[in-house]
Image (cartoon, rainbow, N blue to C red):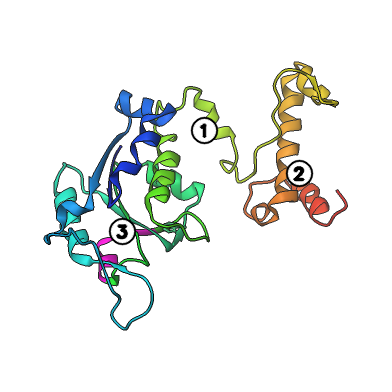
Amino acid sequence: MRVDIISILPEIFASVLDASIIGRARSSGALEVVVHDLRMWTDDRHRTTDDQPFGGGPGMVMKAEPVYRALDAVCANGAQQPTVVLLTPQGVPLTQDLVRELSALPRLVLVCGRYEGFDDRILVRADLELSIGDYVLTGGELPALVLTDSVARLLPGVLGDEDSAFEESFSQGLLEYPQYTRPASFAGMDVPEVLLSGDHARIAAWRRREAVRRTAERRPDLIARADLTQDERVFARRIMEGSG
Ligand code: ADE
């Protein structure tokens, strides 16, 4: 997959994109990321990318012309027609389902906003407006990194153990079960006996049950959409009603 990122702070990205799993995915060729400085597409001496809002009010608005020129240049460059994503708190919330959909695309172009928001005429150039959560950051750069990271780890060959992308939180609509490593006894707390038993069927059943329990306790909103058996649904309901 190729990801182009358009930002006025291109220097923000390197440390995250060079490190660890994402760095390896780039070295292996599974992921190509190109960061572009939006100021390349300004045409004034001060390389202006924002201006005051028409109608008054606080803050500055991201100008349309540099973003249009940037998208014209970046999208023309390369064989595949990219999917253009604007990172904004007004966008659709990012979920693991959406991450999975986006990870199947050949090419993404991410546009990071700064200031109070985008000139609304920029929105027609986007295929998708995306928010990483109901809180406001100083810009779309961290959301672009969150999106790139979440998508990259689903690309074939990026995670070492093919199972680890599947088994964890949200893949089955549930939070992850509790995990432990050595020592078996620590700070007065023992690892559940079943995990030391070597009985793989019992371990799998315990993990599934604990995943349902955790989700019911912490994220009851996920239970309705989770893929549960009748028995699991009864168990989850008991927990949510406080009698589990
Ligand atoms: N820009 C500022 N806050 C944001 C958020 N929560 N998601 C996406 N882009 C943003």
**Residue at coordinates 22% horizontally, 59% vertically from top-left?**
67
Q: Which of the labelled discs sits on residue 213, or is there none?
A: 2
Out of 189 and 210, give the one closest to the viewer: 189
Q: Position of residue 14 (x, y in %)?
A: 33, 36
**Residue at coordinates 15% horizontally, 55% vertically from top-left?**
41
Is residue 230 a member of the stretch shown in magenta? Answer: no
Q: Secondary structure at mark 2?
A: helix
Residue annotated with mark 3? 127
Q: Position of residue 185 (x, y in %)?
A: 81, 20
Q: Could you classify mark 3 by the number of other residues whose Cα lies within 10 Å: few (under 14), some (14-19), or many (20 or more)?
A: few
Please determine whether, in this image, residue 122 is positioned above or below residue 1.
below
Residue annotated with mark 1? 165
Q: Which of the labelled discs sits on residue 204, or is there none?
A: none
**Residue at coordinates 37% horizontally, 28% vertically from top-left?**
23
Q: Secondary structure at mark 3?
A: loop
Q: Position of residue 206 (x, y in %)?
A: 76, 31
* Magenta residues, start to end: 121-129
Q: What's the residue type where badge 2 is placed?
A: Arg
